[in-house]
Image: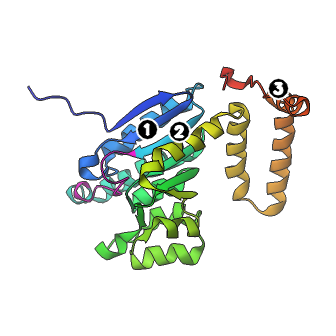
Amino acid sequence: MTDPQPPFVRRSDADGVATVTLDRGDRLNPLSLGMLDALSAEIGRLREDASVRVVVLAGAGKHFCAGHDLAEMRARPDEASQRDLFDVCRQMMLGLLRLPQPVIARVHGAAVAAGCQLVATCDLAVASERATFALPGVKSGIFCTTPGVAVARNVPRKRAMELLLTGDPVDARTAAEWGLVNRVVPAEKLDEEVLLLARKIASHSPEVVRLGKRLFYSQVERAIEPAYAEASEGMVCNLLMDDAAEGIDAFLSRRPPTWKGLGAKA
């Protein structure tokens, strides 16, 4: 009798921070159908877990994520299978974007093709100095069109096209200059910096942060006038929350706030 296949992802929770790790490090954590299904299932669980304030997305082994599983793609070359793969991937990426909690990508090695898309889809990204980023599909006859959707919403268009048309990798410092990651730190400081950022976000009202994330992504794709209209309505809803009253009172009284929203306490 063979041992059951280990889970594609593993999760650990501490102090309101859930760390979800792609756990196929021996294969560079490819986004196979199994991995995509596992990520989607975990995103569903996180969505319903009010105790989680921040999510960290990490990769096991030497690299973050090598993108789609090319061997699996070649083994299923028919049109229906290809459509299924990209439908599943799209839904997972949208699920990550719509997750109420902020998501931080912890990038310690290569983030390639759909792996780079995964970084771009996260709300924030902290990278090791050893990290690299690439959309190399063009070199193998596959233009990275779907990764380009997320990447082009992080970096200027000409930078995105450079990644897409050359397929060449950029280092972590360049990725930070272009806007793909928030900060770059020494490899030995990566976990410390990710946790510091996660805990800082987790110290704020979870109800307010969830509202703010949803409104940000809703308004940012709109024209300026409807964006302001939606944002203004969002501010009104925010100010009617108990946590807004508590936050203002705490500021005026020069004391730390005690958040009430979603039942969790920092």
Tell me what residue is drawn at x 44 percent, y 74 percent.
Answer: 164
Q: Position of residue 84 (x, y in %)?
A: 37, 51
Q: Which residue is mark 1?
A: 20
Q: Quadrant of the N terminus?
A: top left
- Residue 27 in magenta? no
Q: Secondary structure at mark 3?
A: helix
Cα distance between the residues tagged 2 and 3: 24 Å
Upstream in sequence: badge 1 or badge 2: 1
Q: Earlier in the sequence, mark 2 or mark 3?
A: 2
Q: Residues within 10 Å of mark 2 (few under 14, many from 20)?
A: many
Q: Which residue is mark 3?
A: 242
Q: Which mark is residue 92?
A: none
214 vs 16: above or below: below
Q: Quadrant of residue 225?
A: bottom right
Magenta stretch holds residue 62: yes
Q: Amino acid at mark 2?
A: Val
The amino acid marked with disc number 1 is Val
Query: Are the residues tagged 1 and 2 within 8 Å (C-beta)?
Result: yes
Q: Residue at x 74, y 59 (%)?
A: 222
The kind of secondary structure element at disc 1 is strand
CA–CA distance in space, label 1 to label 3 = 31 Å
Q: Residues within 10 Å of mark 3 (few under 14, many from 20)?
A: some
Which region of the structure is painted magenta?
59-72
- Which amino acid is tagged 3? Asp
User: Residue 165, image x and y in percent?
Assistant: 43, 79
User: Mark 2 highlights which residue?
Assistant: 55
Residue contact between numbered discs 1 and 3, judged by CB atoms under 8 Å: no
Who's the residue at 36% across and 52% down the image?
Answer: 85
Tell me which corner region of the image, top left, top right, bottom left or bottom right, holds residue 112. Answer: bottom left
